[in-house]
């Protein structure tokens, strides 16, 4: 068994795990963070996407021991009942999701994109979401929501102080 | 060389099914604070049907959708529903909810008629009030009526109803009948680019016009259409379950059973055509399965327009399209009409 200590959504978390334990199962089963979803478990669907040191990764393909000493952000780190991240607000306003199973991973991928590139083009948005499969929405309203956020921010930046 | 093509396809589709009876039941109770609770056996899987059912109850009762709590999918407490299948929920369950809400409203109107000194038929429920149709200033808060109905009059405002779509059996002599209560119609246009050296098809744009009756929630109708088209693109170009000689599926996961990603689904433009179905709840029909029906023929017609080949065996993979282009080239070289 291995000791893992990581910063998860700003708080220090510890777990004792067997070597083959994935980050996803540690998040869900040891730390109770069930926002990240177990879809395919082989890195195809993206429902388990989290940020590790700011980069989006499939947490089903990462071993828990690999995040020892690193910083993990899950969907729970973006918002909750009292406060929603601006991405979540935009997705809610545009009815971007239907069944919602892909939503946590999709939102994390969108955050990773906007952290790196605050003004992406539509092809860049599509490229960033290509690892997050959605069977309900046709991606249309997901892309609309991200586009809207970028436009709102661009207007805010251009507006005189 | 990439060759552009456009294709169009139309469809009609029946709402609900007709093998046997197709009923839904619902219970609506109006609470003493003017909110309402809907009990339904149907299941929400992301399509937004509970939102729509809440809107239907709210419209009938003259309250806001935020004030309707929909309790669903628990057969211990909810009345019977045939299911979230056959694109039937808005039409069939929606009618049951509307009728149940109307029954609860009847009690409210009767109690309010005593309070306002008017006949129930002269009253309407709107804007969280029961008010005179011709003198809207003559009104009483719906919450007050609901509380009075329950506490003073001993008649809790409650309604329950079932709806089974009316159909006409086939006449064995003429072959005529009406197997479904409502039909929806749609047209989609696909713009594609076909690489005539690889057979690869890229869908550049899809425009979709869908008549779903009166859209109770247009944003949700758009979402259904967009999602259906994405599935249609998968069915047209890449999705195929492959079996080995022993009947085992050889592509049982998303690595090799490919579904469209954000890079495969193009801009989708949805035109929600508003019509009014006299049997539908507030004129609504349905939207669900029909959304992907025209997608495949529109794409296949666009491939034909681009490179002159007819693909009749889905999915139209690059290999199949290229093979068809080569076969055709032996007969008639590309680019000569």
Image: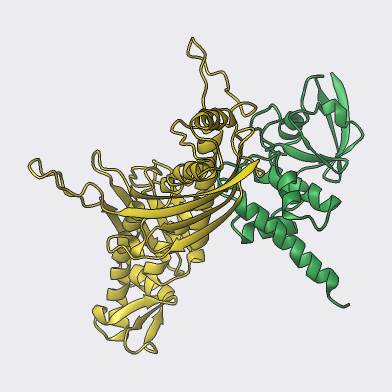
Eyeballing the image, is B188 above or below B66?
Answer: above
- The reply, left or right, for residue B263 in relation to residue B211 is right
| Residue appearing at x 61%, y 36% in the figure | B196
Q: Nearer the viewer, residue B161 or B171?
A: B171
Residue most extreme to the left: B173
Residue B90 visible within the image? yes
Measuring from the top left, give residue B216's x and y in whole percent: 43, 63
Measuring from the top left, give residue A84's x and y in whole percent: 72, 57
Residue most extreme to the top: B246
Residue most extreme to the right: A69
Residue B157 visible within the image? no
Q: How many marks do you count on the picture?
A: 0
| Residue appearing at x 41%, y 75% in the figure | B142
- The reply, left or right, for residue B62 in relation to residue A76 is left
- The reply, left or right, for residue A4 in relation to residue B45 is right
Measuring from the top left, give residue A90's x and y in whole percent: 68, 60
* Chain letter, yellow in picture: B
Eyeballing the image, is B242 above or below A58?
Answer: above
- In the picture, which quadrant includes the C terminus of chain A? bottom right
| Residue appearing at x 58%, y 28% in the figure | B319
- Residue A11, by quadrant, is top right
Q: Chain A drawn in what color?
A: green
Colouring used for the render: by chain
Q: Nearer the viewer, residue B246 or B279?
A: B246
- In the picture, which quadrant includes the N terminus of chain A? top right
Q: Nearer the viewer, residue B220 or B145?
A: B220
Measuring from the top left, give residue A5's x and y in whole percent: 88, 32
């Amino acid at each position: 068994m291995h000791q893992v200590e990581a910063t998860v959504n700003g708080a220090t978390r510890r777990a004792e795990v067997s070597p083959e334990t994935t980050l996803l199962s540690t998040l869900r089963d040891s730390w109770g963070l069930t926002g990240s979803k177990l879809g395919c478990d082989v890195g195809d669907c993206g429902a388990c996407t989290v940020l590790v040191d700011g980069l989006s990764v499939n947490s089903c393909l990462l071993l828990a021991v690999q995040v020892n000493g690193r910083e993990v952000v899950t969907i729970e780190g973006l918002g909750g009942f009292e406060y929603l991240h601006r991405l979540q607000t935009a997705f809610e306003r545009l009815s971007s999701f239907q069944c919602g199973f892909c939503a946590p991973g999709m939102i994390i991928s969108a955050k990773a994109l906007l952290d790196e590139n605050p003004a992406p083009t539509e092809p860049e948005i599509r490229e960033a979401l290509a690892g997050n499969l959605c069977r309900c929405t046709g991606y249309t309203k997901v892309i609309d929501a991200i586009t809207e956020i970028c436009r709102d921010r661009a207007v805010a930046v251009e507006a005189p102080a | 060389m990439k060759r552009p093509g456009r294709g169009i396809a139309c469809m009609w589709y029946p709402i609900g099914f007709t093998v046997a009876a197709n009923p839904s039941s619902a219970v609506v109770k109006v609470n003493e604070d003017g909110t309402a609770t809907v009990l339904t056996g149907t299941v929400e899987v992301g399509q937004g049907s509970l939102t729509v059912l809440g809107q239907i109850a709210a419209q009938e009762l003259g309250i806001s959708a935020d004030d309707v709590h929909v309790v669903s999918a628990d057969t211990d407490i909810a009345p019977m529903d045939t299911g979230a299948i056959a694109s039937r929920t808005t039409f069939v369950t929606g009618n049951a909810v509307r009728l149940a809400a109307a029954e609860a409203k009847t009690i409210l109107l009767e109690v309010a008629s005593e309070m306002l000194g008017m006949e129930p038929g002269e009253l309407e429920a709107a804007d969280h009030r029961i008010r005179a149709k011709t003198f809207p200033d003559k009104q009483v808060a719906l919450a007050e009526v609901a509380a009075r109905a329950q506490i003073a009059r001993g008649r809790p405002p409650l309604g329950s109803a079932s709806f089974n779509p009316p159909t006409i059996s086939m006449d064995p002599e003429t072959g005529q009948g009406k197997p479904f209560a409502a039909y929806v119609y749609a047209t989609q246009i696909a713009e594609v680019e076909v690489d005539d050296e690889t057979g690869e098809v890229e869908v550049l744009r899809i425009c979709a016009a869908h008549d779903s009756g009166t859209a109770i929630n247009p944003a949700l109708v758009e979402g259904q259409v967009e999602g259906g088209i994405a599935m249609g693109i998968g069915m047209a170009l890449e999705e195929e379950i492959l079996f080995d000689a022993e009947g085992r599926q050889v592509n049982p996961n998303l690595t090799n059973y490919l579904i469209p990603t954000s890079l495969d689904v193009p801009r989708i433009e949805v035109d929600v055509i508003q019509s009014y179905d006299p049997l539908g709840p507030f004129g609504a029909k349905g939207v669900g399965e029909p959304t992907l029906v025209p997608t495949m023929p529109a794409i296949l017609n666009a491939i034909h327009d681009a490179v002159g080949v007819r693909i009749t065996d889905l999915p139209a993979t690059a290999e199949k399209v290229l093979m068809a282009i080569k076969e055709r080239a032996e007969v008639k070289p590309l680019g000569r009409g």
